[in-house]
Image: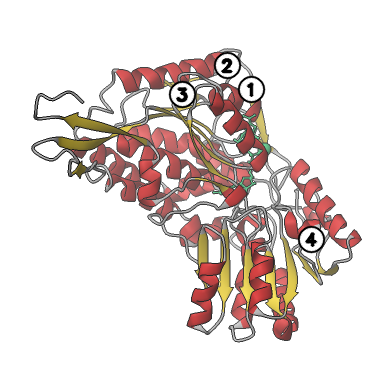
Amino acid sequence: MVASIKPHRDEIGLSDGLMLIDGEWRPAQSGETWSHIHPATGEEVASFPIAGPVDVDSAVRAARRAFDEGPWPRARANERIRVLRRIADLVREHGDELLALQALDNSVPLSFGTIYATSSAFVADVFDHHAGWVDKLAGETLPPYQGGDHMVFTLREPVGVVGAVIPWNAPLLLFAQKVAPALAVGCTIVVKPSEYGTFAVLRLARLIEEAGLPPGVLNIVTGPGEPTGDALISHPMVNKLSFTGSRAVGRKIIAASADGFKRVSLELGGKSPAIVFADADVSSAAAITMGTVTLGLSGQVCLAQTRALVHRDVADDFLGMAEIIGGMVSYGNPFDPAVTASPLINTRQMDRVLGLIAQGQADGARLVCGGTRSEGDLAAGNFVAPTLFTDVSNDMSIAREEIFGPVLSVIPFADEEEAVRIANDTEYGLAATVWTSDIKRAMRMTKAIRAGTIGINGYQLEPHAAFGGYQQSGLGREGGRAAVESYTEIKTVLLPITDEMM
Ligand code: NAP
Ligand code: MG
């Protein structure tokens, strides 16, 4: 049996949650609550309110008032910088507690929090990075066509009330990537976390309150996509929707934006390739690629490298090492330091992953290892054994669908041209890695592949680098200037100096 998570819950002092609306911690008006089931043990963790349309309306109206009349959009730059830096410091101080809450949410193992991209330090750095934008985002002064003393310049103004909807796999990081730029430019915001990633977000919201953010600027409405998310994205007082999640919900966001022409940013999924040439360090390529699909979140990561395109000459070496890594994965209670990977988030997701694995076998791919639900001691959780397929062709569903589980598909290729063709034969375009010792080839591949992030012999995320997708992997970017600008409108100011009209 996986040890109970309840002692950890009690140690943290997690009680039945309330949500944050207009500076007050409240239950839902209906009194309805959602009870969270832990994915590793099947135990009930705790509950939190299900915000209905009335609660969401209060939250949006609070954000609207805070934007139209409140101090935050009008604050001095150094005041906004001070609050964002204080948030970063509080996240660092409470880093372990936040990661523990995340483990109560989605069972991501604490051992994974030592890796920069999944640590509290990264979340803190996102706030620090955006604090730096507060006094640097600027408009432009343009030379006038009409000559003389005409003045033409632009202002960057906050877009207004932001409605953010985030998923459960990295609730702290994905919250920070939306809230930090929105706050930096002076927006107000209503966040709906996933009901599978709520506890860590609620704690982070309390820290943000403690950092001195005025009431109503940040509001959290908890509950599922229906009714909570739906009420937020369709609310007419929201100016911008910022979403991370699946393509299916992404389409609903676009549809909901049509009414009032809300601004939209989307971070969607991927089917990212790792392209491994014969001159690469094949062992590292195999270890890291299999690792991105199995360790930590068990492949429930948007930029997991789920298609390994491997040169025929080194395919056996690659498979050998990938299988070893798969065999080293250790499942169980996320608070156990020996545990290295999570279960799948819920039984629906587990059934979907097992269905796609069965489809891969039916399509003729060869299963090297895994492929089944883990039973015995692990039977109470949603664990699927690390799974490796070879002899995959790129038209099989395991090569086309985002599986969001611990499944790597190995696709052999003969030359660079074929590798590029297979890599780009996808509806997605989030990321890719290129494994080679030839820098010229690495650069040719970087230019040829249509994806938002390219890693060369590995990848490490950075809080200030643009992140996002080509094609159906999204719309817009998070991190860096493009992300900050996406929370603003441009206002052009014309100041004719002569009396001539127009
Ligand atoms: P999801 O089902 O799309 O859910 C994302 C969020 O949308 C959740 O908060 C969800 O609430 C909410 N939602 C669902 N239906 C809604 C509706 N009708 N109106 C408004 N909101 C609604 O995605 P997920 O299963 O949580 O996460 C997996 C997906 O996210 C994958 O496709 C993955 O690639 C993508 N992802 C992308 C990135 C990135 O940065 N590109 C990062 C992480 C994940 P519920 O929880 O109630 O459904
Ligand atoms: Mg969902």
* Residue that label 4 marks: 395
Q: What is the CA distance from the residue labelled 4 to the residue labelled 2?
A: 43 Å
Tell me: residue 72, above or below residue 470: above
**Residue 68, placed above or below residue 254:** above
Spatial CA distance of label 3 from label 1 is: 17 Å
Task: Quickly name the residue at label 1.
Answer: 227
Please say if the residues under marks 1 and 2 sit with CB atoms less than 8 Å apart.
yes
Q: From the viewer's perspective, is 130 left or right of 305?
A: left
Query: In the rendered structure, which disc, 4 or 1, sits on the residue that comes first in sequence?
Result: 1
Dividing the picture into quarters, in which one does residue 252 lie? top right
Q: In the image, residue 433 lies at what x, y percent?
A: 57, 69
C-alpha span from label 1 to label 2:
7 Å
Dot 1 surroundings within 10 Å: few (below 14), some, or many (20 or more)? some
Separation of disc 4 and disc 1 at Cα?
37 Å
Residue at image mark 2: 53
- What residue type is disc 4 on? Asp
Would you say 227 lies left or right of 499 here? right
User: 385 or 487: which is nearer to us?
Assistant: 487
Please, what secondary structure does the residue beneath circle 4 have? loop
Between marks 4 and 2 in the image, the one whose residue lies nearer the viewer: 4
Q: Nearer the viewer, residue 154 or 408?
A: 154
Res. 286 visible in picture: no
Element under label 2?
A: helix
